[in-house]
Amino acid sequence: MELYFSCLIRKRVRFRDLDAAAGTTAVNEHLHLRFHPVMTAACGVDYQGEEPPLTDFPVTNPAAFVPHWLEIDFRHGDWVGRFGFD
């Protein structure tokens, strides 16, 4: 799960084929979750590629930002997800 801080805020669930990594929580042997707050390295549109370069977003009060729920589904051959707050 990613909470994206920049000129605008974006919520996105990314699905990656990775082994369990530091900072993940195992749901089962095939699914691990990680919440990763990020922001753009700089605001603007003068970057190369489809998305601006990202950097970690330091969160001093994680309880205020960690999502309360996550939904994942497999639709039309792709994993999709969304998360939110109560």
Image (tube, rainbow, N blue to C red):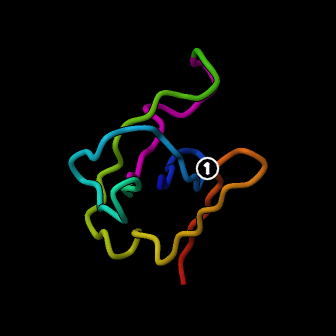
Residue 64, above or below 60: below
Image location of residue 49, percent across then percent down: 60, 18
Magenta span contains residue 37: yes
Residue extending farthest bottom: 86
Q: What residue is at 37 percent from the left and 38 percent from the top?
A: 18
Query: In front: 42, or 70?
Result: 70
Q: What residue is at 61 percent from the left and 59 percent from the top?
A: 81
Residue 19, above or below 68: above
Q: What residue is at 59 percent from the left and 28 percent from the top?
A: 51
Q: What residue is at 58 percent from the left and 52 percent from the top?
A: 12
How many residues crowd mark 1 within 10 Å: few (<14), some (14–19), many (20+)?
few
Q: Which residues are magenta?
A: 36-47
Residue extending farthest top: 48
Residue extending farthest right: 76
Q: Is residue 32 visible?
A: yes
Residue 57, above or below 44: below
Q: Callout 1, which amino acid?
A: Leu
Instruction: Specify the quadrant of the image occupied by residue 11.
Output: bottom right
Query: In front: 29, or 44?
Result: 29
| Badge 1 element | loop
Image location of residue 59, percent across then percent down: 30, 59
Residue topped by disc 1: 8
Residue 59, above or below 4: below
Image location of residue 72, percent across then percent down: 59, 63
